[in-house]
Amino acid sequence: MGRTNRKRRSTLANRAIAASAALALGGGGLLAANIYASAGEGKNSTQNAQTTAASVATIKCPDVGQQLRNVPQRARAGVDKELAALDQQITEAYARLASTRQAQAGDAGFVQNSILGPLNAKRTATIERISINIKRGGGTAPSGVGNLSKCTGWSAGQPNTNAGQGNNGQNNGGQGQGNNGQGGNAGQGGQASQPPAGGGASQPPAGGGQTGNGGQGGNGPVAADFQDIRTVQPSNKRGVGANGLAANGRSGSRGTFTTSCGTNGNDNHNTDNVIVAPGVTNGAHHLHDYVGNQNNDAFASDEDLAASETTCQNQGDKSSYFWPVLRLQDGSQDFDQNNDGGGKEGNVGKILQASQAQLKFVGNKKGNVVAMPTALRIITGDAKAFVNGLANANTNWSCTGFENRQLTDKYPICPRGSSVVRTTNFQSCWDGQNIDSANHRSHVAFVQADGTCANGFKAIPQLQVRLVYKVAAPTIQNGTVKNAFAVDSFPENLHKPITDHNDFINFFDANTMNKMVNCINTGKQCK
């Protein structure tokens, strides 16, 4: 069973956590900036130092794990632990960034000398250990990995130049919305959050309540992260990813298989991620909902997962389905307010349980699908997309009654009577050999624009997850959002909607998997 902890904490502890999470208002944009070059000398140095402090909204570091392709199997455990150490280092550096605004305002070199410099030194040593692990495992360390140690400060109030979505759909894992998506005339993207006049920082009240435009605990979301769904241009396709991802053509495998596994009513939560950080407690640095398999934590082996209980009505499905929790940020707290991955890392507010969780597998519009192998792992979306960019982003936000209108880098503001919808379409091409890969992505892929799988990959049933939440719409007044909601995230990613993601580990038994494949390939709708 996933770990839960429902301890209460004192007001003093609340204040300490709130202070550690405080961040300059606005939350930052996607443009990296050299915020040190403008820090002048003489009579203007204080003003420049204050501007510098307000400019650094978060920390951007190269994602080392995504650069690893050929890690020997016997080296992966050691490499995964070192990658988790890199995440921990960034988390600690971000906490220091957020809690030292006064020092930054008085010293233009503080961020570089006291935060980024030490962080880069730690990363250099950790990346070297990754290379050593790979070599000891019989592999060759990738060239250039040693150049991935340098982290930079990212500024607030800069144009979000990467917010626009492409025109080619979600191919090869990339975010793509077509002409009806973000960054165009629909008014959905482009401009990042702005800091307050004067660029000053703000301390949230005890308990991490909403402050100005800085979001719960000061690290997002902000008003610019929300959009009224009624202002989004409708698409003629229902849901993101319909651009060749689902079996929506006149040919191919057009059946479906739906499994019902509940909405995590038993509060199975933890902050682990057994896929990317096996054996590491709090490897995700944010809280997950788990449905289906009830034994998923950082230390679960494939044997543990195969022998687990499941919340699925079909007991032949012991697969694990998990995603970051959605929280209401109205000043209330939840059981993890004093925990790693929770309040300690800026993930605060009331955890919302989905009112619906639909788990459906569909086919391929060009041909039949093959069975997924036992223990196949698939991650879709990117929990670090705000700082990593959109290469692996896969986010879909909408409202009931408006699901032909989709947002990717905004949370939806739904009209009265309408509920928030999170939809995720997984990769549906498999390399035919591996249940995982060194970067946890290369063994699976999205279909190409014509619906086929590239590079000899095989079509497998595509998992589609649709989560519905009954949550009151946030309000925005004078650039301030109140009663916001947001997904949990790595703290440096500021709870941006683009960071939503979803995880799956296949543990259907052979009979149930064969039934799924047969239903899909023969055009049946099965449960």
Image (cartoon, helix red, strand yellow):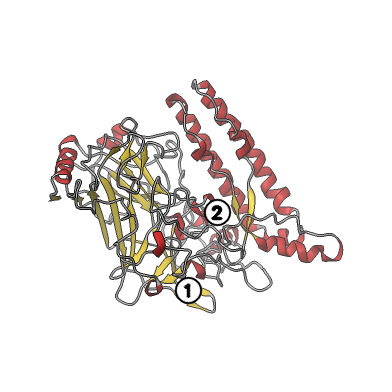
Where is residue 281? Give x, y as percent.
45, 41
- Kindly tell me whether residue 198 is visible in this rendering: yes
Q: Quadrant of residue 454?
A: top left
Secondary structure beneath label 1: strand
Closer to the chain start, of discs 1 and 2, is: 1
User: In the depicted view, which residue is nearer to us: 424 or 481?
Assistant: 424
Where is residue 94? Give x, y as percent.
60, 52
Q: Is residue 25 above or below residue 139?
A: below
Residue on which disc 1 sits? 482
Q: Is residue 146 left or right of residue 442?
A: right
Type of amino acid under label 1: Lys
Q: Is residue 102 left or right of residue 129?
A: right
User: In the depicted view, which residue is nearer to us: 519 or 302?
Assistant: 519
Q: Quadrant of residue 452?
A: top left
Near mark 1 (Cα within 10 A), the count class, few <14, some 14-19 or many ≥20, is: many
- Kindly tell me whether residue 264 is visible in this rendering: no
Q: Which residue shows up at 86% across the image and 66% down it?
A: 43
Where is residue 346? Give x, y as percent.
51, 58
Q: Quadrant of residue 428?
A: top left
Near mark 2 (Cα within 10 A), the count class, few <14, some 14-19 or many ≥20, is: many
Residue on which disc 2 sits? 492
Q: Which residue shows up at 63% across the image and 58% down it?
A: 99
Question: Which part of the image, by quadrant, shows the N terminus?
Answer: top left
CA gap, disc 1 to disc 2? Answer: 21 Å
Where is residue 250? Give x, y as percent.
19, 52
Q: Is residue 456 above or below residue 310?
A: above
Type of amino acid under label 2: Glu
